[in-house]
């Protein structure tokens, strides 16, 4: 009956008693089929012979210090397509939903919604037969005040402590940087975002310093996580070296980042460590274009600018004439170029292995858009979970070790000759791999820092001062 249905607006507060979540703001969206709850640190386990899953929920938007630890019986695992078109595998649980004074059981998928506007999405399957939506209204059922919300979640606020960790990067809103900040805070560390462009240095043999905007001296950090974009490699690595001079642990060293950004040197280094790569030629404005093309087996070939990133400056030349045209165009720029054999059998797919502290913690297969040969997520490629072979795992670990990187994104391509290494990234993105695998990669990075400091003294903390 009409009068028995709960009338709600497009945004409402609800609760999940069986999960111990007293109130959470939800986006009511009849356009979405399934409901989704923001969850991190998702981990399946066996309880009384049944499949369960445990996870943490930050029920309040833009607040990672308030944490509810949940566990629930696992109903299913499904591939869900997000509103942005990204496909990911999610765990599905059941829970009582309480809204408007009524309670009923619904299914919920678990996913990291930190970049979304709401921690909870209420889909039409959960609303069917029970809810009417007035899309022009919001909070028809009321909403808590800031004070009441603080009181409700008082016991769920985590205590600060642990290490003082800086994320040295350019964009605080970038998914990867936000996740690393969140993961560190979740584990009780004091996290600070350090904008590379707002840091400056004092070079001195006895008292080297790094200053931040306003003259603040950065002399009280235990660890720094460099997340340096290619366009600012020189200055970012100079800052990282300065932190190293101050005896601050850097999750990737300046030397490792520098050599990983030099595509030619990194390939030479990898070959010296016994890592196979596609046949590659290198030249600076070559005069003998024909011999360079012949060197890598003839067309089709890949032509790369040495300074290109994220698939930019990479061209597929399918014929000899096209290859000559591309190389000659790059010659006019007096650019350093790589030419590489094209692995046709890879069919626009590659494998990204995420290596942390000498272990492959996750792997995904990236697939290019139809008609595109570059599988980069930034260029619209899709990601899916893949089980890599023992040989591929060995290559990824060997490559990261050869580059001396504690954190690395290692890209591998499957060929008729076996797995070949494409490149090693010292600041790999987290969004694609976390979304596809549901793994807390940012948390693994924090664990690597904790492992370094195990049984080691840390610096005395200065009074807490926000740098963000």
Image (cartoon, rainbow, N blue to C red):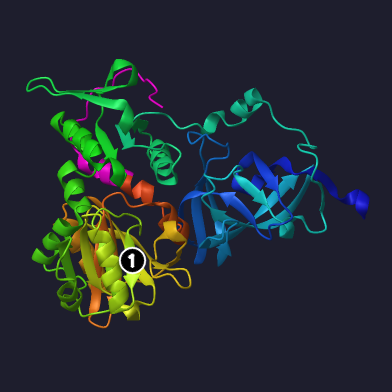
Residue 381 image point, x, y percent: 45, 64
Magenta range is 446-468
Residue 375 image point, x, y percent: 39, 66
Residue under label 1, please give it: 315
- Is residue 168 located in the magenta-colored stretch of the structure? no
Give the class, few, some or many, for how many residues have Cα within 10 Å of label 1's Cα (few <14, many ≥20): some
Q: Is residue 467 above or below residue 4?
A: above
Residue found 15% across the figure and 31% down from its top: 247
Residue 257 image point, x, y percent: 21, 47
Magenta stretch: helix, strand or loop mostly: loop
Q: Is residue 62 above or below residue 278?
A: above
Helix or strand or loop: what does disc 1 sit on?
strand
Residue 274 image point, x, y percent: 11, 68
Q: Is residue 103 above or below residue 207?
A: below
In this rendering, would 92 be left or right of 341?
Answer: right
Q: Is residue 163 visible?
A: no
Q: Is residue 246 visible?
A: yes
Front-most of 81 and 415?
A: 415
Residue 271 found in image quarter: bottom left
Picture mark count: 1
In this rendering, would 404 be left or right of 168?
Answer: left
């Amino acid at each position: 009956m009409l009068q028995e249905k709960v009338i709600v607006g497009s945004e409402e507060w609800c609760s999940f008693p069986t999960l111990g979540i007293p109130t959470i703001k939800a986006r009511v969206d009849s356009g979405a089929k399934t409901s989704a709850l923001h969850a991190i640190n998702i981990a399946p386990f066996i309880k009384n012979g049944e499949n369960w899953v445990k996870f943490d929920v930050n029920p309040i938007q833009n607040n990672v210090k308030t944490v509810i630890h949940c566990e629930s019986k696992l109903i299913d695992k499904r591939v869900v397509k997000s509103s942005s078109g990204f496909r990911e595998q999610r765990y599905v649980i059941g829970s009582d939903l309480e809204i408007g004074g009524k309670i009923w059981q619904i299914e919920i998928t678990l996913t990291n919604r930190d970049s979304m506007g709401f921690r909870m999405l209420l889909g039409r399957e959960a609303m069917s037969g029970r809810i009417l939506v007035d899309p022009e209204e919001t909070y028809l059922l009321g909403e808590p005040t800031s004070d009441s919300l603080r009181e409700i979640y008082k016991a769920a606020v985590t205590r600060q402590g642990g290490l003082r960790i800086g994320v040295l990067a350019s964009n605080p809103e970038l998914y990867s940087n936000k996740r690393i900040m969140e993961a560190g805070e979740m584990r009780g560390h004091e996290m600070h975002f350090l904008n590379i462009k707002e840091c400056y240095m004092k070079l001195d043999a006895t008292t080297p310093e790094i200053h931040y905007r306003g003259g603040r001296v950065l002399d009280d950090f235990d660890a720094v996580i460099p997340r340096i974009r290619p366009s600012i490699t020189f200055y970012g690595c100079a800052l990282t070296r300065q932190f190293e001079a101050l005896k601050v642990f850097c999750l990737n060293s300046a030397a490792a980042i520098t050599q990983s950004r030099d595509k030619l040197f990194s390939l030479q280094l990898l070959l010296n460590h016994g890592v196979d790569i596609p046949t590659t030629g290198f030249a600076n404005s070559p005069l003998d274009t024909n011999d360079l093309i012949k060197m890598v087996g003839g067309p089709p070939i890949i032509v790369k600018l040495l300074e290109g990133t994220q698939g930019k400056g990479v061209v597929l030349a399918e014929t000899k004439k096209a290859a000559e045209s591309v190389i000659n165009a790059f010659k006019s720029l007096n650019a350093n170029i790589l030419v590489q054999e094209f692995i046709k059998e890879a069919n626009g797919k590659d494998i990204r292995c995420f290596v942390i502290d000498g272990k492959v913690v996750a792997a995904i297969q990236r697939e290019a858009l139809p008609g595109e040969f570059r599988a980069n997520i930034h260029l619209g490629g899709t990601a899916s979970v893949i089980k890599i072979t023992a040989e591929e795992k060995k290559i990824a670990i060997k490559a990261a070790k050869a580059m001396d990187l504690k954190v690395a994104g290692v890209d591998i391509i499957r060929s008729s000759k076996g797995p070949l290494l494409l490149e090693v990234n010292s600041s790999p993105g987290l969004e694609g791999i976390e979304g596809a695998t549901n793994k807390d990669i940012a948390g693994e990075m924090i664990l690597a820092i904790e492992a370094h400091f195990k049984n080691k003294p840390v610096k005395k903390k200065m009074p807490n001062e926000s740098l963000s």
